[in-house]
Image (cartoon, grey):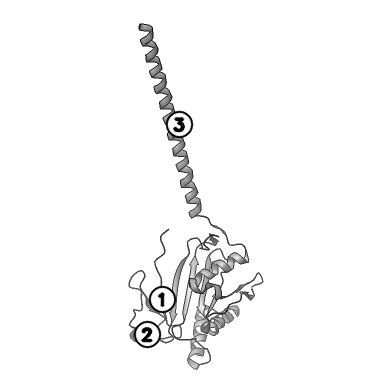
Amino acid sequence: MKRLITTIFLSVVLISCNSSGKDKNETDTSSATEAAIDSASIDRKNNYVPIDTQEALIATSLMAAPAASRAGCKVIGYNAAGELVTLKEGDNEFIVLADDPNNATFSAACYHKSMEPFMARGRELRAEGKTAPEIFDIREEEAKSGKLDMGKPGATLHIYYGPNNRYDPETNKVEGAKYRYVVYLPFATSESTGLPENPVGPNHPWIMNPGTHRAHIMISPLPEKE
């Protein structure tokens, strides 16, 4: 009788140990699986690679344009020799100035084609070695005299910029990049628009360079949350 009781007791203990070991293995396996899923999720969210091809440069620079207009935008940019070339032909109202691939940061701009004389004049003066204040004064004088066409009042400039030159190939989003919008109203003032001359808070429009040829409404949206 004692032998039978001892046998039953040992069997129960053995079954209990095996069960505990199985539960522990299942817990360890489950934790490892969850960790792998979390890691894969992080990798997907941070799938950034260098912008190292012309196709990637065009795709990321087009992010500066309104989504509905990207396919029809003309894209211009600088080649390795520093020459301004057409990277992509377009047929709508926008021109995109691509990011400079030789710069460690990222900056692309999309503007209404009526502003091309103003933008082109700025590039021309910079190529001549003129400083920012000199460019401002020259274009101010030329705009006042009517020599420089400032484009249609209310023409917009869309800027997509950030501290890195890496992007996500699935979305074409550039790492850490955000938007800024500029609405040009040459010679407009705070009085003529009702806008303050300084930002009163994040995400609020204000007028910059009031009363000059470069008077424009600044709009800096808050960055998207990752």
Q: Quadrant of the N terminus?
A: top left
The residue labelled by disc 3 is 25
Please tell me whether mark 2 or mark 3 is closer to you in this view: 3
* Horizontal arrangement in the rendering, residue 50 relative to residue 183 (left or right): right
**Other-residue count near label 3 (Cα within 10 Å), few / some / many at <14 / 14–19 / ≥20:** few
Report the Cα–Cα distance between label 2 and label 3. 72 Å
Q: Residue furthest right?
A: 81
Q: Earlier in the sequence, mark 1 or mark 2?
A: 2
Please tell me whether mark 1 or mark 2 is closer to you in this view: 1
Q: Is residue 37 above or below residue 90?
A: above
Question: Residue 120: x percent and y percent?
Answer: 56, 82
The residue labelled by disc 1 is 218
Report the Cα–Cα distance between label 1 and label 2. 13 Å
Front-lying residue, 48 or 119: 48
The residue labelled by disc 2 is 189
Front-lying residue, 126 or 91: 91
| Residue at (51, 83) in percent of width and height | 115
Q: Are marks 2 and 3 in contact (CB under 8 Å)?
A: no
Figure quadrant of residue 23: top left
Which amino acid type is shown beneath numbered disc 2? Thr
Question: Residue 109: x percent and y percent?
Answer: 51, 73
